[in-house]
Amino acid sequence: MSDLRTRKYQQWFQGADMDGDGVLSREDMVRIAERAVEAKGIPPNSPHARQLNESMDRFWTEIIAPYDVDGDEAVDVAEMTEGFHAALTDRSRYAEQIKWVADLIFDLGDTDRDGVISLDEFSQVFGAGMRVPDTDCAHVFGLLDADGSGTLGRPEYHDAVVEFFYGDDPNAPANHLFGRI
């Protein structure tokens, strides 16, 4: 196991553990969706909010819950880290494993539907949804904006998500996607 990937996964876990009880549950995934919807000012009963809730429920069921090795309907950091290390080994599987939820988060962030995410949009989604501090959002956004456009296009965003979950480059800006590690 890569120490860097372990630290990134643990950082992701901290942001996803909405109630701070040291385990991930279906309720944590729902709360991520609720916080993001609230931050974006999306009506909670809108089709977009329902789609996000359904997708986060799917993320729980298909991605996180299988790591519940002790059957307690919760995944602790050790279970999740071990599961991510075992499952997220081949970048070519990104499309089937993570891309669908990454696309959903991108679409949620792209409030004005212009096909890119601004720093403000990025901060709303990652700050509210995953509790990433604003200073970390600004820092990593600046590093991820490789072309200096002031926005992240879908390809830049996906490159960052791939690097975060699958990469071992200690100098990759995407290491800090969910807060500085």
Image (cartoon, rainbow, N blue to C red):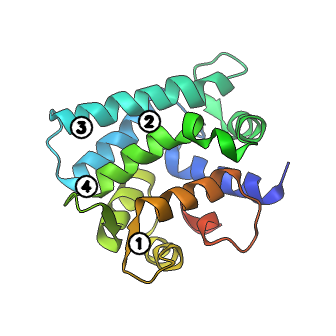
Residue 3 in which image quadrant:
bottom right
Of the two numbered discs 4 and 2 on the same chain, state the one appearing first in sequence: 2
In front: mark 4 or mark 3?
3
From this viewpoint, is residue 142 visible? Answer: yes
Of the two numbered discs 1 and 4 on the same chain, state the one appearing first in sequence: 4
- Read off the residue under disc 1: 134
Q: Quadrant of the C terminus?
A: bottom right
Q: For mark 4, does the 10 Å Cα neighbourhood hold few (<14), some (14 to 19), or many (20 or more) residues?
A: some
Q: Amino acid at mark 1?
A: Asp
Residue at image point 59% right, 31% down? 64
> Considering only vertical position in the picture, is 14 above or below 66?
below
- Read off the residue under disc 3: 49
Label 3: state its secondary structure: helix
In front: mark 3 or mark 2?
3
Callout 2 touching callout 1 (CB < 8 Å): no
Residue at image point 77% right, 60% down? 168
C-alpha separation, residue under disc 4 versus residue under disc 3? 12 Å
Q: For mark 1, does the 10 Å Cα neighbourhood hold few (<14), some (14 to 19), or many (20 or more) residues?
A: some
C-alpha separation, residue under disc 4 versus residue under disc 2? 16 Å
Q: Amino acid at mark 2?
A: Met
- Read off the residue under disc 2: 29
Of the two numbered discs 2 and 1 on the same chain, state the one appearing first in sequence: 2
- Read off the residue under disc 4: 39
Of the two numbered discs 3 and 2 on the same chain, state the one appearing first in sequence: 2
> Considering only vertical position in the picture, is 30 above or below 72?
below
